Amino acid sequence: MADDEQSLSLPVATEAKKRHAPKAPELPIVERRNWLIHQHYIQKDYDTCKVIIKEQLQETNGMCEYAIYVQALILRLEGKIQESLELFQSCAILNASSTDNLKQVARSLFLLGKHKAAIEFYYEAARLNEKDWEISHNLGICFFFLKDFKSAEEHLNTALQINKHDKTFMMLGRVHLLTGDTDKAIDVFKRAVEFSPENTELLTTLGLLFLQLGKYQKAFEYLGNALTFDPNNYKAILAAGSMMQTHGDFDVAMNKYRVAACAVPESPPLWNNIGMCFFGKKKYVAAISCLKRAHYLSPFDWKVLYNLGLVHLTMQQYASAFHFLSASINLNPRMGELYMLLAVALTNLEDIENATRAYEQAVTMDESNPLVNLNFAIFLYNHGEKKRALDQYQEMEQKVNFLRDGSSSHEFDSELMDMAQKMGGALQVADNLVWTKPGKDSKSKAHSASASKTSGSALGTNQALGQAMSSAASYNKNIQLPAVIIDPNPGYNTGIRAWG
C-alpha cells in the first residue's frame, strides 16, 4: 500500500521541479509601435503610417522620437519642408547625441535654401562623427551653392578619402569646371570611370569634355562605351550625332537623332540639331520648322535664336533674321559674332547707321575671330571709307598671325581666304597677305550651305556657311558646348561667313 502511495506522489514531485519559460520583455510604451511604423513606411503606405504615428504620439504625449522622425520624413516627401524641419528639430532636442537627427535638420535647411544654417548643423554632426561620407559630401554641396569653391573642393576630397562615390566625383568635377580648371576636371572624371567603369553618366560627361576640347577620338571612345552599356542613353546619342554633324555626316547624324527622339521627343537640343542638319542639307523650310519647335520648347536658348537668324539670313529674309539675332543678343550680349551677323542683316535692310554701330560693337567685343574685322573692312570699303577699311584689314591680319602662331595646324577656310585676297587687292596690300593655303582638316572644314549675291561691288557678297552642334547635349547647364559659331578653330563648329 505504501508503494502505491509513493508511486502516486512521483508525478507531483516531477511537476514541481519544472521551470517556467521566461516571458518576453515588454517594450516601453514609447517604442511599442516602432516596428509597425517602420513596416508601413518602407512599404510606402504613408496614410496608414500616419494613423499609427498619431496613435503612438497620443499615447506617449509626443515623446516618441522615432514616430516624430518618420512623420518628418513623410512630410518632406509631400513637399512640406518647413513642417518637416520643425519635427526634425524636435527629434534633435529629444536626442541631441544622434548624428542622424542633426543631418536631417541640415538637409531640410538645405532644401529651404538656407545653406549657411545647414553648414552649421553639418559641422555639429561632424563633431559627433568625423568619418561620415554623407556629412563631408553635403558640406561640399552647400559650399558649392555658396560659390565658395575652394571649401567645396576640400570637403568633397575629404568625402572621397572616406568613401569613393559616383556623386562625389561628379560634384568635384563640376567644381573644377566652374573654376575653369578643365584638366583637373578630366582627371577627376577619369578616376571616377576607373572606380565605376559602367556608369554611363560619367562616361558621357567625359566624352562631352573631350568633344568640347576637340579631341574627337577620345570623345568617340567614351561616348561609344556609354552607348555600349546603355544603347538608349540620349545624352550620348545627341553627343555622337553632334560629332557626326560637325563633320558633315548629316544623314548619319539624323539616324542617331531618330533614336534619341524616342526617348526625349520634347528635347530642345534634339530639335535644334535636327534643324541644323536640314540646314546643312539645304532644306531651309524644314530647318526653320524644327528650329521653331526647339524655340517653342526653350524660348530663352540663345543658340536656337542664333540658328534661326542664321537660316533666315541664308534665305535672304533679313527682317526675320534681324528679329531672331536681336533676341539672341539680348540673351547673350557678350558674343561679337552675333553683332556681326546683325550688322549683315542691317546692311541688307539699308540701315547703314545701325549696321556701322553693330560692326563697331562686334570688333570691340571680339578678340580672336579675323572674320569680324574682314567683314567690317568690306562694309567700310563698300561705303567709301578706305582708310578705316585698311585699319580693320590690318587688325584682321594681326588676328590671323596670332592664330597661326598659337597653332601650327590651324587652317583657314578657302572662301574666307579668297575674299581676303580680293579685299587686299582692292586696298593695294595684296603682297603682304598672311593667309596660308587651306587644308583638309576635318576639324576646321566648313560645309557650304548657300551663296547668294547682293547688289553692290564684287566684294559685297553674302555667304552663309555653317552647321551646328547644340550645347544641350551636355550633362548640365554649367558645361556648354557651342552652337553654330563662326570661328573655324579646332574644337568648334563652323558657322556663318557673311560678307557685308
Image: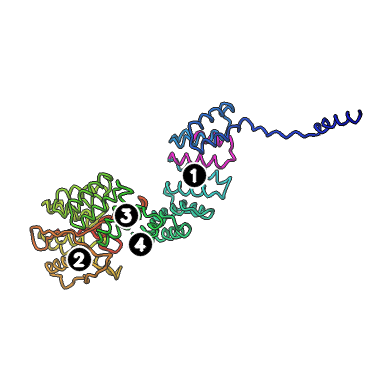
Which residue is at the front of the view, 440 or 117? Answer: 440
Main secondary structure of the magenta stretch: helix
Calculate the distance from the C-alpha at mark 2 to the C-alpha at mark 1.
Answer: 56 Å
On the rendered image, what quadrant is the N terminus found in?
Answer: top right
Identify the residue under disc 1.
119
On the rendered image, what quadrant is the C terminus found in?
Answer: bottom left
The amino acid pointed to by label 2 is Gln
Q: Earlier in the sequence, mark 3 or mark 4?
A: 4
Tell me what residue is drawn at x 29 percent, y 71 percent: 408
The amino acid pointed to by label 1 is Ile
Q: Are marks 2 and 1 in contact (CB under 8 Å)?
A: no
Calculate the distance from the C-alpha at mark 3 to the C-alpha at mark 1.
Answer: 38 Å
Calculate the distance from the C-alpha at mark 3 to the C-alpha at mark 4.
Answer: 12 Å
Measured along the vertical axis of the image, is residue 254 above or below residue 414?
above
Identify the residue under disc 4.
220
Q: Earlier in the sequence, mark 4 or mark 1?
A: 1
- Residue 180 in sight here: no
Tell me what residue is drawn at x 50 percent, y 35 percent: 72
Q: Earlier in the sequence, mark 4 or mark 2?
A: 4
Q: Are marks 2 and 3 in contact (CB under 8 Å)?
A: no
Q: Earlier in the sequence, mark 2 or mark 1?
A: 1
Q: Earlier in the sequence, mark 3 or mark 1?
A: 1
Where residue 222 appears, as percent x and y from the top left, is 39, 60
Q: Secondary structure at mark 1?
A: helix
Which residue is at the front of the view, 13 or 188? Answer: 13
In the figure, is residue 67 to the left or right of 184? right
Identify the residue under disc 2.
394
